[in-house]
Image (cartoon, coloured by chain):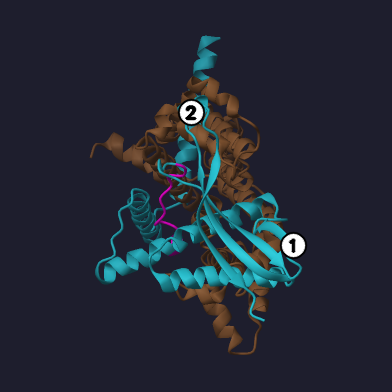
Chain colours: A cyan, B brown
Amino acid sequence: MLKALWHMVCFSSSRVCQSVGEMKSDNQITIGTRCFLVVGLLHLLVALAGALGFHYREGKLGRFIDGYSVLSGADRQWGFFSNDSRTENRISFDVIDGAGTHSQHCFEEGANREEMLRINDMMARLWGMAREKDKEKKDAIIGSLAGKIFARFPEAHEITINFESIGLPNLTEYRAGVRTHWTKFYEVKYVRPS
Amino acid sequence: MSDRVKSSIREFFFSPASSVPIAVLRILLAGILLIQAFLLSGQMLELYGFNGILQSTVFSHLSLGGYPTLAGLQTRLSGWGIDPDATVRGTFILYVTSLASLLVGWKTRTSTVICWATHFLLLKASFLSAYGVDQFANVFLYFLIWMPGGQAYSVDAGWTSGKPSLQARISLRFFQIELCIIYFTAGLFKAFGAQWWDGNAIWRSVTSPIFNQFDLTWLASVPWFAKLLGWSTLVLEMGYPVFIWVPRTRWLWLSGVIGLHLGIAIFLGLHSFAAVMIALSLSAFAFSPEFNRVSKSYGSAEMEIRQEKKQPSLA
């Protein structure tokens, strides 16, 4: 019985070895494969450097690596939710029509979850840009938003764009009674030219 | 270098592998991005258009890095009398069509190139609104250009599981290593912040008005639980490049990572992001032939095929 079992093991292992041997001969490691391997390893190196926040942009080689990294996504850092000082912002707007009726809106209105996340991200980043000292850039961004709001609300006579940031209490603060609140950082009024 | 090390490297990078994991990546990624495109189609012009929420007048103030952009394409084509909105619609339709083609694996390589290029244009057009899922899509669509994505379960391959190949092995290894880099660095950067150690990162995420889906304020009364979740995330992410390779811990880690992303989908409402992350880990490590029981049956089937092939020569 044991002898039969031993013969079976020997036979199957020799078959496996034979099979692996064949597979290797069928798939020769050609120069093309070696090039593919080298390029792939270089890509991983660039991706690792990008993920760790190292970017080389000096000279022609640096510009090439930088361009390649952007196109392939190898320049990305992946520390989602890693920033301690992450703040959340929103941009809302008050609309006053010709009859003097007030209403409050935001760009996320009527959007599904996927759209909402994107618009929210856009607003948060625009909010950050609106804080910049570059007045021309700031005016272009806010003016563009105002134009969009007037286009969306043709009956609007006056609009106020509100830039707010959130105050999120931490675990200890929440237990002490502090609650989430929005703080207005900046507001700007536009009146539709008659 | 000793023969043992050489042979290990050879086995790791050069033993032919099935294209099934890459086909799974192709199908899952294309499927998720198609659903996402459908969800975004209603706001397409608002997000990507010349007169969208971010209007063309703002673009001149933003640094776009000199790469091909949808705004550039719109400007160029408008010179030929093509409406900028029509350019956005055309690019979006091309993107969706290439995704559908990628899903079924028809003209896979060409579809992947078109899909990656159109995705890149849309990504750059909406870079202010892009988030994790877009970045991952960009990276892995680029990977798929070089991978033999159409060699299994595709129109190109006649819906068969395909033959093992060296290209599939090398591609799979690069895909797996890239995923390990992503998880490890994600964990590493989180670990630098105190909030992941004291539970506040979890707390802030689930109570943020932007992400919160349920009232989880009760976490404040069980802070150790928030801390435990934070630590578990760090262990899962930083341990990924080690424990996902160890046969004994592979399924534990895979389950943990899937659980983490399911949690992100349910409690933070980041559905497409979570779906892409689950798809990446599943295709990289759950379908790899050497990793599971499927592999054993696959391996034996492969041997049978080889033996069958050998028969005529023996005869």
Chain-order first, disc 2 or disc 1 = 1
> What is the x, y in percent for residue B101?
67, 62
How many tags in the picture? 2
Which residue shows up at 51% across the image and 62% down it?
A: B127
> What is the x, y in percent for residue B216?
61, 29
Q: What chain does mark 2 sit on?
A: A
Three-letter residue code for mark 1:
Thr
Crowd class of label 1 (few under 14; some 14 to 19; many from 20; radius 10 Å): few
Name the mark on residue A171: 2
Q: Which residues are magenta?
A: A71-81
Q: Residue furthest front?
A: A100
**Residue B253 position (above or below residue B136):** above
Q: What chain does mark 1 sit on?
A: A
Q: Which residue is mark 1?
A: A101
Prevailing secondary structure class for the magenta stretch in the rendered image: loop
Determine the secondary structure under disc 2.
helix
